[in-house]
Structures are given as structure tokens and as C-alpha cells.
Image: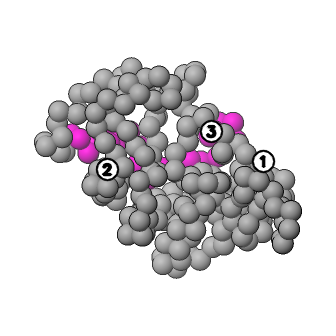
């Protein structure tokens, strides 16, 4: 397991963004772990998160010209990731959308740099894939091309069919999905963490029941 992925999981646990226990998902499943990226809610943790995004994006090799963050969680992620990428010497513009169109000033629903070239979408997770679909439509309507999607955690879990939400998005739009970490990384972390051994079998069982192939 790549060190930065292990570091990210350790960081998420420290911030209690990642927790173990019994949590009911939107699909009604009882999950042995819960990930809430909204708890990266201060300057230090957001800075660290942005650097993990930048690392995973850079390692992916996906080519892009700018970043787009869908409202609302994607807004801060797009700004933060672009700053972390600039630290690495890769300065790119970013944009985001409003939920409601503005009828004064510059107007419209888009804010930031004009959507053009290859656009990387950034969000926290892909659940139903709704924000990605809306983002793809906005990007294409502007005459730009979606280049991929970057997320924090891929649960690698089936949706309504045999594919996960991430796999459905990747297949529907022929886009790479870049995750800082995924369920396999989490299992690897647990296998190397004796103090968390009590959670390992529960996560393994959950993956066996609801997981998808790579």
C-alpha cells in the first residue's frame, strides 16, 4: 500500500472523519465504518486534505487543464486542491457552480475561471453520482471536456446493480476516477494495525457481502 494512502487513513481516523462501529447507510445497510469528509472543517485539516488530493491526482497521471468543484462540498475542495497543486509547481485555474442562478453582477451559475480544455471534477465521495452527472453536463455545455473525477474515498460497494457508483460513473462517461484511498487500502491499514484488529473481520465481511470487483 502506498504510504500516502496509509497516511491519509491514519489522518482521517485522527480527525474522526473515519470511524468504526455500526452505521446505517442511505441504502439501509449496516456498515462497520463511516466516512464523513465534512469533518475536515478547520484550516489545518483542510490543508492536509488538499495535499492528499494533490498527491493522488499527480500520481494518477490524468491530464487536465483546470479543476471544477460541484456545489457545495466541491467548492472548498476545488480551491484547496488547486492551492496544493500550485505548491507542487502545477498551477491550474478552478471554477465551481452555484445551486441557484445569480441574476445580477456577473450572473449565471458558474463562478471562477472559464470552463475550457480538460476539466478535472473534484468531490468528497461518489454516492449516487448525481453531482458528477450535473458537472459533466455543465462542463460539456461550456464546450469543455471532462477529464476525470477525484474523490477522497472509494467504498468499492455495489449500488443498485452489480457495479459501484464509482464504476457506474467511470463506465457511463468513460472517465477515470481517482481516489485518495479505497476499501482495499482500508483493509490493508487494518491488517497492519493490531490496535484496530477488532474491526478487521467486520470490514472484511461487509466487503464480501456488498463489495465489487476492482
Where does the image place residue 90, in percent across and percent down from the top left? 56, 75
**For the residues carrying marks 3 and 2, which lies nearer the camera in this image?**
2
The residue positioned 35% from the left and 25% from the top of the image is 206
Magenta residues span: 169-191
Helix, strand or loop status at disc 2: loop
In the drawing, what numbered circle is on residue 137?
1
In the drawing, what numbered circle is on residue 16?
2
Q: Nearer the viewer, residue 100 or 159?
A: 100
Earlier residue among tags 3 and 1: 3
Helix, strand or loop status at disc 1: helix
Q: Residues within 10 Å of mark 1 (few under 14, many from 20)?
A: some
Q: Residues within 10 Å of mark 2 (few under 14, many from 20)?
A: some
Q: Main secondary structure of the magenta part?
A: helix
Where does the image place residue 195, in percent across and percent down from the top left? 13, 43
- Residue at the farthest left position: 194
From this view, report whether residue 26 is shown above or below residue 68: above
Q: Give the residue pinned by disc 3.
A: 129
In space, the residues marked 1 and 2 are separated at their CA atoms by: 34 Å
Q: Is-magenta flag for residue 170?
A: yes
Where does the image place residue 31, in percent across and percent down from the top left? 37, 29
Q: Can residue 125 be seen in the rendering of this structure?
A: yes
In space, the residues marked 3 and 1 are separated at their CA atoms by: 13 Å
Amino acid at each position: 500500500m502506498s504510504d500516502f494512502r496509509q497516511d491519509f487513513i491514519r489522518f482521517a481516523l485522527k480527525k474522526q472523519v473515519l470511524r468504526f462501529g455500526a452505521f446505517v447507510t442511505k441504502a439501509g445497510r449496516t456498515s462497520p465504518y463511516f466516512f464523513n469528509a465534512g469533518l475536515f472543517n478547520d484550516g489545518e485539516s483542510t490543508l492536509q486534505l488538499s495535499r492528499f488530493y494533490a498527491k493522488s491526482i499527480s500520481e494518477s497521471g490524468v491530464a487536465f487543464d483546470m479543476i471544477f468543484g460541484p456545489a457545495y462540498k466541491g467548492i472548498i475542495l476545488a480551491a484547496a486542491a488547486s492551492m496544493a497543486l500550485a505548491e507542487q509547481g502545477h498551477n491550474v485555474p478552478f471554477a465551481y457552480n452555484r445551486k441557484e442562478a445569480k441574476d445580477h453582477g456577473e450572473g449565471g451559475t458558474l463562478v471562477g475561471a472559464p470552463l475550457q480544455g480538460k476539466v478535472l471534477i473534484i468531490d468528497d465521495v461518489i454516492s449516487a453520482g448525481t453531482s458528477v452527472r450535473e458537472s459533466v453536463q455543465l462542463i460539456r455545455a461550456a464546450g469543455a471536456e471532462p477529464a476525470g473525477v477525484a474523490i477522497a474515498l472509494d467504498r468499492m460497494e455495489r449500488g443498485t446493480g452489480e457495479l459501484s457508483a464509482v464504476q457506474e460513473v467511470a463506465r457511463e462517461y468513460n472517465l477515470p476516477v481517482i481516489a485518495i484511498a479505497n476499501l482495499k487500502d482500508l483493509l490493508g491499514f487494518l491488517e497492519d494495525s493490531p490496535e484496530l484488529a477488532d474491526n478487521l473481520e467486520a470490514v472484511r465481511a461487509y466487503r464480501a457481502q456488498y463489495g465489487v470487483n476492482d
